[in-house]
Amino acid sequence: MSGEPLALYVHWPFCVSKCPYCDFNSHVRTQIDQDEWREALLADLAHEAHLLPGRRLTSIFFGGGTPSLMEPAMVAAVIDAASIHWNVDKRIEITLEANPNSVETARFADLAAAGVNRVSLGLQSFDDRALGFLGRAHSAREGFAALATAQKHFRRVSFDLIYALPGETDDSWSAMLGQALSLGTSHLSLYQLTVEPGTRFASMAARGELTPLDADTAAALYELTDAMTSAGGLPVYEISNYARPCQESRHNLTYWRYGDYAGIGPGAHGRRLGQRTERHKKPENFLSAMRRNDHGIAEEAPLWPGEAADEALVMGLRLAEGIDAQTIADRFDLPCIVDWKRVERLAGSGHVKREGSRIALTARGRLLLDYILGEIAAPAQSVPRASAVG
């Protein structure tokens, strides 16, 4: 395994406020001891590095939460430690998610000096009313200013937008997307609003205070997005991600291509050496586990070959490039991972493209991803339970 590529995910769980659509592991705290958290993250990192000696580190991703609330010195410490533990790829991609308010934007120069070379901005909208609906703490004006600052300090910049909001139309979304495409970034993450269980939006929907956009209108907006991004030189490469050639997120490609990644910090997931890992979610529980065990792992379990192959299929079909079903089957020593008769039927209906053992979704197929996965996946066997670590 020495020299094989590895990605590192670092989760910072803290936010200034909780957005009503967010189901990520994020927590609001009035005080954060940055020194305590630096030491905890470095110890959690050392635990993963001990298990993965000699690997080639291809990417680091600081996600959250709001990792731009981290002190730049802490970010630098994690990057420096990772570069000591592993061999660093000369093209390493180091991404940090950031919110576009003035306090965090002021840290961009120091974050770039710390080693961050790619930033992902949570702009979410260019419309102040939509930002208010989404519970965002910044204005559209602050968003544009943050983007300009990011483009000054980082070689690569991406930003997120959320669309298919209640009342969204072709005209309103095409105007916003056209503006986004004119801003000169090489990558966009464009997510349709989904009402996730446990969020404030879910409670509002249950009370009849929020009516999500109907499925047909949302599908039409997705097709419009596909057409406009392709025409603008940022074609889709993953269900919700669009980029110029060679500007895709290399870190996220590791997930979708089912490569190994170490995950540290509260709630972080990892996949390495045929195992899946999950850290304690609540920050206080994570710190308690660190004091007990010198790592924050809550659960760690082997990935059964059928389970791993199914995950590789699910993740890989999100990509425009698709998957090689036979390569995945061979990797996990399985006879087959798909029902080829159903694949052929979906190819005949124009939802799937097939070349030999390679399968990819068409533009029509991407609208029905979940249905297609359910149709073509080979019958699964039982999966063993995860083991608690402590």
Image (spheres, rainbow, N blue to C red):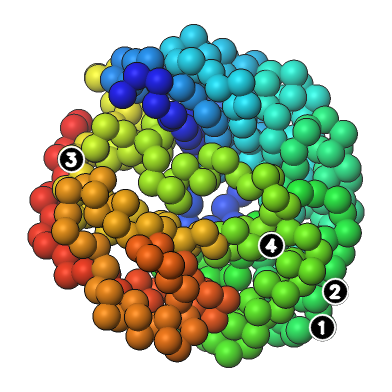
- Please name the amino acid that badge 2 sits on: Ala
Q: Position of residue 189 (x, y in %)?
A: 65, 57
- Tell which circle, 2 or 3, labels the residue nearer the N-terminal end: 2
Residue designated by label 2: 175
Q: Quadrant of residue 105?
A: top right
| Residue 93 appears in view | yes
Residue at point 69%, 35% (across, down): 118
- Tell which circle, 1 or 3, labels the residue nearer the N-terminal end: 1
Residue designated by label 4: 235
- Quadrant housing the N terminus: top left
Q: Position of residue 95 (x, y in %)?
A: 63, 35
Tell me: 313 left or right of 5. Answer: left
Q: Quadrant of residue 91?
A: top right
Q: CA distance from mark 3 to mark 4?
A: 36 Å
Q: Residues within 10 Å of mark 3 (few under 14, many from 20)?
A: some
- Please name the amino acid that badge 1 sits on: Asp
Q: Secondary structure under badge 4?
A: loop
Q: Secondary structure under badge 1?
A: helix
Q: CA distance from mark 2 to mark 4?
A: 18 Å
Q: Is residue 11 above or below residue 179?
A: above
Closer to the camera in the image, 150 or 296: 150
Q: CA distance from mark 4 to mark 1?
A: 21 Å
Q: Nearer the viewer, mark 2 or mark 4?
A: 4
Q: Is residue 55 above or below residue 346?
A: above
Residue designated by label 3: 302
- Tell which circle, 3 or 4, labels the residue nearer the N-terminal end: 4
- Tell which circle, 4 or 1, labels the residue nearer the N-terminal end: 1
